[in-house]
Amino acid sequence: MNAIALATRLGATPLSRPEPLVSIENLGVRFDNVVAIENLSFAVRRGEFVSLLGPSGCGKSTLLKAIARLVPLASGKIVLRDPNLRIGFMFQKPLLLPWRTTLDNVLLPVEIQLGGSVVDPTDRQRARLMLDLVGLRDFVDAYPHQLSGGMQQRAALARALISDPDILLLDEPFGALDELTRELLNEELIRIWQSADTRLHTVIMVTHSIPEAVTMSDRVIVLTGRPARLIEDIDVRCSRPRTPEEPEPGSIIKRIRAMIRGGR
Amino acid sequence: MRSRIQAPLIFGLLTLAAWQAIVMAADIPEYLLPAPSVIFANVDRTLAIQLGVTFVEALAGFLIAGVLAFGCAIMFVRFNTLEDGLFPIAIAVKTTPIVAVAPLLVIWLGTGWWSKIVAVILICFFPVLVNAVKGLKAADAEYRELFQTLGASRSQEFRKLRIPYCLPYLFSALKISSSLAIVGAIVGEFVGATQGLGYLIMVSSAHLETATLFAAIAAAALAGIAMFYAIGWAEERVVFWHSGNME
């Protein structure tokens, strides 16, 4: 299986591509005696939208947390091209602070970076811009409990975007929402990723939905269950916007499904 | 809102009327059970002054206890060693009955204000400490991970996450302590005082002035209720976001 993965990666014309922004090299993560991730290697290049696909509890989220330095590594390493790379993280839950308005929630990363000093009007302006971008223009002064689940997650996206992350890590960002809202937000996420209003370029997203991974990403990295190992690294080169019903994404979806069902 | 006040008011008045009727019909002697009308006749300036004394003692002790306990809670959560070492001592202090300690307070601090205020502090401190420690630890691990990804310092995590998150817990503790504060002040006054509701209760009971005794009891109850509702009023304004969907 690793041989297939390696072949896929080598076959993908490495010379024509920019050097990796993040390289994961022989990564291993362990919780007490449970091995969450074992001997995992792959790289993400600047500008890519990469999905990590695998069954629930396979260690995908742990991998994302490892990249964000939230969990210690047992072996291997994660190399960032620039150690000062800004990493944005968006969780499955919105995690808005209920005592803050939408605008103040979006400003939280700015406040934390500033330490003690006061948030200036430019930052406020920027926060408003981010809220415009995610479609919350009219809810700037609302409190989280006044927003629907989808709107809360939009606010969380605005908060993740405000500090201009070089890499945005998304942990099943819309997984807790209903199917319709989820599809809509997935489309908006792609729109924002493609738009010139943010400097957002590189995205690593965890998902357990094959159609979601294929319609959204440039590359789908398929992982096995615990411990997480790489089964295959698939380039998705169809034009955007895509739907799972179209023949080309459709065939990739079928291929991945067969791969996962067919076992490791 | 209207029915929330109306219903208890009507029932309260009916109870008082029944009380009045029974005392008059059965001709119960005043020293056993005075009629409400006789008790109301005993509400005078002296009672108001005694109530004021007790209320000030209770309020001062309550505020000092609140600040001390919240400060301690922050230190406990920030430095676990402190919690491990001091929490058992706090429990030991809590389980000692305040009535048993009150005479000692009078020996140390005299019969003035401070013996009562310290009694109030002792009785109010613990509920606030326990709830505040619980509240400061209540923010989900995911919230703390969010703060970690944002590069927040420990003190930023406290100021922007843990302390606001703790406020609903703090307010429920303050409500409990607000009624205990009056108890502490009166117990302190029982042991050695020259003024206050506790003093009035002791003196009027010794002289079998039952109507004055009842008036003092009612005043003590009212003081407790007033403090409880004042905290509730503040709570609705400060943690207005809590009634919504906290995660």
Image (tube, rainbow, N blue to C red):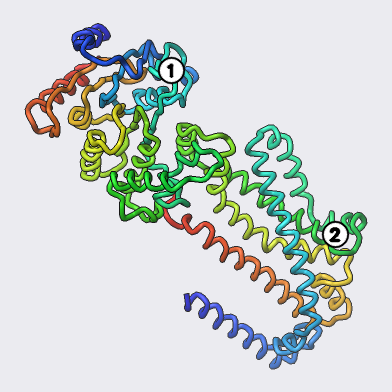
SS assignment at label 1: strand
Give the image quarter of residue A25: top left
Q: Nearer the viewer, residue B119 or B26?
A: B119
| Image point (38%, 25%), residue name | A64
- Packing grade of label 2 (10 A; few <14, some 14-19, many >=20) is many
SS assignment at label 2: helix
Give the image quarter of residue B42: bottom right
Q: Nearer the viewer, residue B179 or B58?
A: B58
Q: Chain of mark 1?
A: A
Q: Quadrant of the N terminus of chain A?
A: top left
Instruction: Return the x and y of residue B132 as percentages of the image width and height.
Output: 62, 47
Q: Quadrant of the C terminus of chain A?
A: top left
Q: Chain of mark 2?
A: B
Confirm whether circles 1 and 2 share one chain: no
Q: For the residue marked with disc 1, what is the amino acid?
A: Val
Per the image, the residue denoted by label 1 is A29
CA gap between label 1 and label 2 equals: 59 Å
Residue B115 - label:
2
Instruction: Return the x and y of residue B26 as percentages of the image width and height.
Output: 71, 91
